[in-house]
Amino acid sequence: MLEIKNQSLSETFSVYLDNRMSKILLLGAISGFPWVLIGSSLTLWLQENGLERTTIGWAGLIFVVYSFNWLWAPLIDRLKIPYFTKKIGHRKSWIVLMQLLILISLFIWSVINPTENFILKVFDFELTISQFSLVIAVGLLIAITSATQDITVDALRIEQIGKNEGKSMAAGAAIAVVGWWSGYKLGGVVALFSAEYLESLGFKNYWQLTFLILGGIIIFMNIGLMFINESDYFKRENSQKINDQLISNKFKNHNVLIDFFTWISGTIIGPIISFFKKNGFSIAIGILGFVFLFKIGEAFLGRMSIVFYKEIGFSKTDIAIYSKTLGWITTVIFTLLGGLFVIRSGVLKAIFLAGIFMASTNLLFSVLAWSDKSELLFAIAVIFDDIAAAFATVAFVAFISLLVDRTYTATQYALLASLGTAGRTTLASSSGAMVDWLNGNWGIFFIITAIMVIPSLILLWSLRKKIKLSE
């Protein structure tokens, strides 16, 4: 367990003043911003064009991509982007490439309408294409590029901190969460206010124009990315080559086929073997089970929250003020406090208590659902939900950051993070269908989301004395 003893609160807080934390903040924002595009913005765009809750819920299946980015993470750990890797670094070159693809996707969204069709003529043939399908296809492309970007963003963030700097790693996890929520919440504020303002001016394509505005934010983020240092690439590459050589030594003869098999084995199998070897098979399986289950309830709530707010009578501006702006301020403050709690109390204790708090706050939305429209209740529910999410996320990020092997930073972190996303995306995609099955009884829906966290906490309790974390 990671613990810092005999320190005053001010001494513990001083770790946030490390200049590396500002760089981690930007990396977090880069990672969180795309969720604005395929989360709240896409959801409202579809909802305001008359699509049903179930359709909107199933459209969220594009988030499943985040569950599988570990499949190509080994390649991103090893493959170089021609020219750019030498100029700006291995990790940064991958981020810039993915950001460029997201910009192209936003441009495509800016010229289509999800409720219309268009006819594609190829010679004498006419093909009618649903623009809704194209919207989802572009959303899927954004999800793929964002998930790929996250692999290298998380690796670059972890590699900013020394592997034995446990206190700084916990603080870095808190700052990364602040950055992620800043990118997500403030990006959401820009999206909602821009859409509302453009709609008030009479623009029918106000969401399409909003996507162009969001593209401008991405450009500024990439400018800031250039000021982040990247190190340890050659050391990491040499460690990977040593592991490749160990595999190669198992073969008596060497040829192109054997060399390719060695590279593939070292790239894909090496990180997995390293994880299971460090923890032991049964404990490793338990860790993976906990990671999968921990944030399912939060995901069910989050997937339908925007639809819920709209259905009970809140406008886009109300959502922007209470859920985005107020939520962001709350998240920033309590993420930093959560980081201090993790540092002083230990990762495992923090994540267990955060899970209990996270489940409890979901019940506030049941109260909101069963009450008359109240801005006060809305604000209370959003604030406490964001506090719980902040504590839970920073503890979770610190937990998996301390589990990874630096030789395979991107691959192992992506494996753990995407597994956590798998539980949230694959199961939470049925959230809209669940609300419809409950005949729109939002109160019961939120009670069910609170119960969902219990299995993960039972699993964590059983593993608490067996998990090995880097100090």
Image: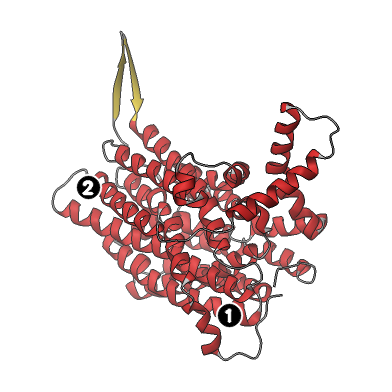
Is residue 151 visible to us here?
yes
Amino acid under disc 1: Phe
The residue carrying mark 1 is 341
**Residue 179 spot, x, y in % from top left:** 44, 65
Q: Nearer the viewer, residue 175 or 162?
A: 162
Is disc 2 placed on a helix, strand or loop? helix
| Tag 2: amino acid | Tyr
- Which percent across, then down, holds residue 456? 68, 62
Dot 1: element = helix
Q: Residues within 10 Å of mark 2 (few under 14, many from 20)?
A: some
Q: Pick the quarter of the image with the N terminus.
A: bottom right
Within the image, what quadrant is residue 205 found in?
Answer: top left
The residue lying at 45 percent from left, 40 percent from top is: 140
> Which residue is denoted by mark 2 in the rendering?
206
Circles 1 and 2: CB atoms closer than 8 Å: no
Position of residue 3 relative to residue 147, above or below, is: below
Residue under the point 68% across and 67% down: 457
